[in-house]
Amino acid sequence: MRMPLFRRMKRRGVLFSVLLLSSLLLVACGENSPSILNPSGPVAAKEAGLFWFILVVATIIFVVVESVLIYSIVRFRERPNAAAPRQIHGNNTVELIWTIAPSLFLFAVLIGTIYTMFNLRDVSGTGRPVQVTVIGHQWWWEFDYVNEGIVTADELHIPVDTVINASLQSTNVIHSFWVPQLFGKTDVVPGHNNTTVFLADNTGTYRGLCTEFCGLQHAHMDFNVIVQSQDDYNAWVTAQQQAAAAKPTDPNALAGQNLFLTSGGCQGCHGIVGVNLKSYNDPKANLLIGPNLTHFGSRTWIAGGVLMWDPASCVVVAGPDGKPKIQNQDACGLYQWLHDPQGVKPGSDMVIRPLSDTEIAQLIAYLETLT
Ligand code: CUA
């Protein structure tokens, strides 16, 4: 009776262990999942170095402890008619060894951690450092370039090999700012401005995320860090500094701008420099709770990465009634966003009146011009 029960438990134990192990292995597998073990800047590299150091120390301890344990289990297992083993309670030598050895290992980890912590901000690049104010909103990131006088959302453009000094602010709840391949997590706390310093070694796009639970859409608070050559970055800054055209030429875009300014109600939350804002620093901008849209057309993400913006999949055509419509509504992320923002991102501040398909097509025709 006892053996089958024991065997069933053993089989369940094996099954449970396999599931647990495979879930641990698969937990980091996701499309475009950025890894701290694939650093692309000195700050992330130092943090990855500390990780490997602690892993080596922990592995040595694990192997030694498990070896002694397994040896003891086998060597001193119970045998028929065996005498009681020799008792070692109160053995000073053994007690000293297992007190001093872990202390040494933990001391090494402590030294490694403190050394890394104090060296983390010691980075130097070639270009002039860029000063950015990062503002965590519910649920998207705003990036204010202090010296360039521009404001973006969802996308942080930075020059390669240049020190970035980021001041982290929140006007609402606690968020946490993290780009796994560039730097570790720093909390973004209302009323307490944290800072972080980092530098990117290579050009490319790096995914960032919010890593402190901040409400319903915490998981939809991603952003991209786009690392460019100094020349490309300068060109991007110059383009961002331009105001939007006061009057678009395309009739659909013009109708979209009218909607933005009047019955669409967009300008109550969003600013466009040259249209409803005089500049990025217009005091009126402080009253607007939505992202600045001056160059929305040049971005790729909508609402913290919940949808993609791609003009190629949002073609405006004339419908059967002669009014503009989006050719393939299902393929157009911006259509879905404007059609039902609360369905796409429940709880977000994007609370709008229902827009007709014609109005959405006109707004998209307008936003497309804001490159
Ligand atoms: Cu912001 Cu989580």
Image (cartoon, helix red, strand yellow):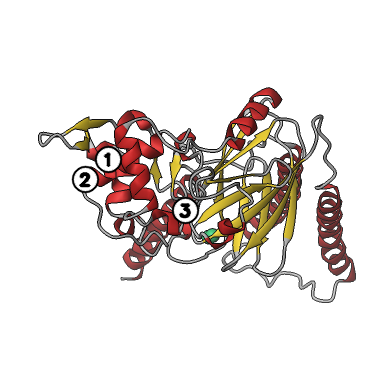
| Res 56 seen here | no
Side (left or right) of 8 relative to 162: left
Specify few, some or many for label 1: CA neighbours under 10 Å numbering under 14, 14-19, or 20 or more: many
Q: Residue furthest bottom?
A: 90
Residue at mark 1: C-beta within 8 A of ligand 1 = no
**Nearest the camera: 248 or 37?**
248
* Label 3 Cα neighbours within 10 Å, binned few <14 / some 14-19 / many ≥20: many
How far apart marks 1 and 3 lie (CA) works out to 18 Å
Circles 1 and 3 in contact, beta carbons < 8 Å: no
The answer to whether residue 180 is left or right of residue 355 is right
Residue at figure coordinates x 37%, y 30% from the top left: 249
How far separated are the C-alphas under marks 1 and 2? 6 Å
Task: Determine which residue is flagged by label 2.
Answer: 357
Which quadrant would residue 369 be assigned to in this image? top left
For the residue pair 323 and 169, the one nearer the viewer reads as 323
Disc on res. 361 = 1
Coordinates of residue 230 in the picture (x, y in percent)? 70, 26
Establish if 323 lies above or below 25.
above
Q: Is mark 3 within 8 Å of ligand 1?
A: no
Q: For label 2, count other residues whose C-alpha is less than 10 Å away and answer few (under 14), some (14-19) or many (20+).
A: some
Residue closer to the observer: 264 or 117? 264
Residue 180 place in picture, x, y as percent: 62, 45
Q: Position of residue 120 (x, y in %)?
A: 80, 47
